[in-house]
Amino acid sequence: MKIIVDAMGGDNAPFEIIKGSQLAFDEFDIDEIILTGDENAINKCVKDNNITLKKTTIYHCSEVIDMCDDAKAVLKGKPDSSMAVGFKLLNDGVGDAFVSAGNTGALTVGATLITKRIKGVKRPAIASMMPGDDNPFLLMDCGANAECKAEYLYQFGVMGDLYMKNIMKVKNPRVALANNGSEETKGTPVIKEAYQLMKNAPYNFTGNIEGRRIPYGDADVVVADGFTGNLILKTYEGVAKVLMNGLKDAFYKNTLSKISYLGVRSGIGDMKKKFDYKEYGGAVMLGVKKPVVKSHGSADARTFKNAIKQAVWFLQTDLIDKIENTFDSNEADAK
């Protein structure tokens, strides 16, 4: 498999992106890494940091889409940007999947309008694996669609169910709808309508889920509109950092607390790993024709390596084909 990488996207590009790509090449079954970006900047970074590029091809690009750029820049504002060229290579079949830590809005526009939606999918969604009390869960949408119709939320459940079955090997994923109460009568008109659709869904819909229950692992897939999902995602990450920093401050308060830390160090380490977003590296675009993965904007090498791992999982499990077949079957049933 060949993985296309936006070498210029993200706060720590190109060094951490290039380094992460090479880590992924060493660890996963990848035939080639394809870097898009400023060739001079990439070669200088490689030389300055003594990086050995293994089976790597560079496609020179004269532009970069910054975090402050309009999302549509990937279409016409900056057609020779590392992200736009990456999407073109993906569409042309030069590579099998595309990974970027760049502008989320631009990546969403590119995935939707360049790579294009799977037939039958109303709106693609950004899906992110999140740590839970016992097991991780999938949160979607995390920002692609700020406003959703009930049908979109229903379809997010379909795609999330397939992701958890095929990627995470959960036999019968529990799909829940994020809401301000567990009762069927709670929520906005759109949420209430979505609830009724999801009650009759072919997946295991378990009802509404309140924010406080999400971390406890009451659902394997948490469905939300992009506005709500993004708030949950960022609040979750912020609270995790506050808690870990608080624990660190408590144990480093004095000599006695430092000694006490020695007895619980292993447990604290396990907890830190559980809530570390770097373990999954980023989010996937579910509902588009080819694998597109959004890594964290502040991704370091390890984080980006794990984002590429998501692309590898996509390709190894033929998840795109499974989503396409499911929506083809649904359309046939509707007729």
Image (cartoon, rainbow, N blue to C red):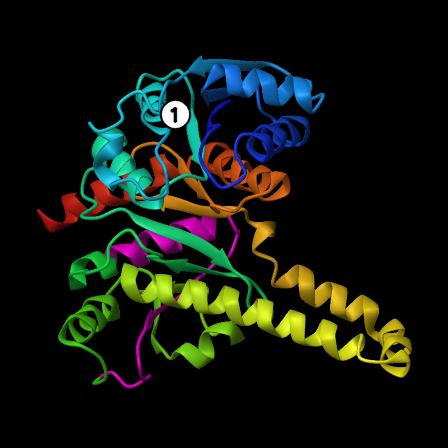
Q: Position of residue 268 (x, y in %)?
A: 75, 69
Q: Position of residue 85 (x, y in %)?
A: 34, 21
Give whichever of 46, 53 is nearer the camera: 46
Q: Is residue 126 visible to us here? A: yes
Mark 1 crowd level (few <14, some 14–19, many ≥20, 10 Å Cα) = many
Position of 298 with respect to 252 (left or right) is left
- Residue at position x 18%, y 43% in the image: 120
Q: Amino acid at mark 1?
A: Ser
Picture layout, residue 205 above or below residue 254: above
Position of 211 with respect to 325 (left or right) is right
- Residue at label 1? 82
Q: Is residue 118 visible to us here? A: no
- Residue at position x 45%, y 61% in the image: 172
| Residue 47 image-quadrant placement | top right
Give whichever of 243, 202 is nearer the camera: 243
Residue placed furthest toward the left: 335
Picture layout, residue 158 above or below residue 14: below
> SS class of the residue under badge 1?
helix
Q: Position of residue 298 (x, y in %)?
A: 52, 47
Picture layout, residue 284 above or below residue 58: below
**Residue 97 painted magenta:** no
Please report the bounds of the magenta region as a residue range. Answer: 155-184
Give whichever of 208, 103 is nearer the camera: 103
Q: Position of residue 112 (x, y in %)?
A: 24, 38
**Residue 156 painted magenta:** yes
Q: How many marks?
A: 1
